[in-house]
Image (cartoon, grey):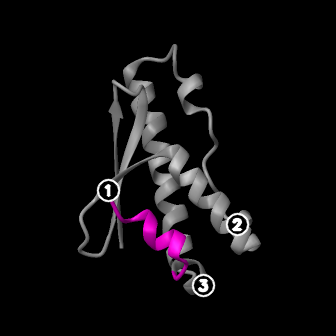
Amino acid sequence: MELLSYRFDAELEAWRYSVCRGGSEPVERRFSEFDALRSTLIQELPWLASLPFPEKGLRTAVQDLTTEWKLELASGREEALRRWLRCVASQPEAEATQHFRRFFEN
């Protein structure tokens, strides 16, 4: 259903995630955009707040870690975001919102 991969953007000093649905072209999103989507969806559908979502603060937490540890943390966050997207997409009322659909557009 969703493709989710990540890379580190050295210029922005931030992790970027590529997402797509179905046969659409992947679009890049930062963690803050996932967080904003979650906040917006919760305003419309408060019960979505109960779905597990990764914590913010990965950037500040990893400053002194080795590259290997940074990649491991990013991989864990990627998997958590993937699970969250699948959960949201499996809920018809959430998946049908224009906010969720726009998230996958350029």
Q: Amino acid at mark 3?
A: Glu
Q: Is residue 29 above or below residue 62?
A: below
Instruction: Read off the magenta span.
Output: 96-106
93 part of magenta stretch? no
Q: Earlier in the sequence, mark 3 or mark 1?
A: 1
Instruction: Determine whether 28 is above or below 99 in the image.
Output: above
Q: Is residue 17 depicted above or below 19 in this figure?
A: above
SS of the residue under disc 3: helix
Q: Residue at x 62, y 32 (%)?
A: 57
Kindly indicate whether the residue at mark 2 contacts the one at mark 1 (C-beta within 8 angstroms).
Answer: no
The numbered disc on residue 86 is none
Q: In the displayed structure, does residue 95 sit left or right of residue 48?
A: left
Upstream in sequence: badge 1 or badge 2: 1
Instruction: Say whether marks 3 and 1 touch (CB < 8 Å).
Output: no
- Screen quadrant of the C terminus: bottom left
At 44% from the left edge and 28% from the top edge, which residue is drawn? 70
Query: Hey, which residue is sitting farthest bottom in the picture?
Result: 92
Task: Judge the density around disc 3: few (<14), some (14-19), many (≥20) Cα neighbours within 10 Å.
Answer: few
Which residue was labeled with disc 2? 42
Residue at point 24%, 64% (across, down) = 25
Q: Residue at x 70, y 66 (%)?
A: 42
State the residue position of label 3.
93
Residue to which mark 1 is pinned: 27
Residue 43 position (above or below residue 18): below
Lower position in the chain sequence, tag 2 or tag 3? 2
Residue 39, given in percent of the width and then of the height, sits at: 67, 58
In whole angstroms, how far apart are the C-alphas of marks 3 and 1? 23 Å
| Residue 93 percent location from the top left of the image | 60, 84
Mark 2 is surrounded, within 10 Å at the Cα level, by few (under 14), some (14 to 19) or many (20 or more) other residues, namely some
Kindly state the secondary structure of the residue where label 1 is placed: strand
**Residue 56 x %, y %:** 62, 39
Real-space Cα separation, disc 2 to disc 3, in angstroms? 12 Å
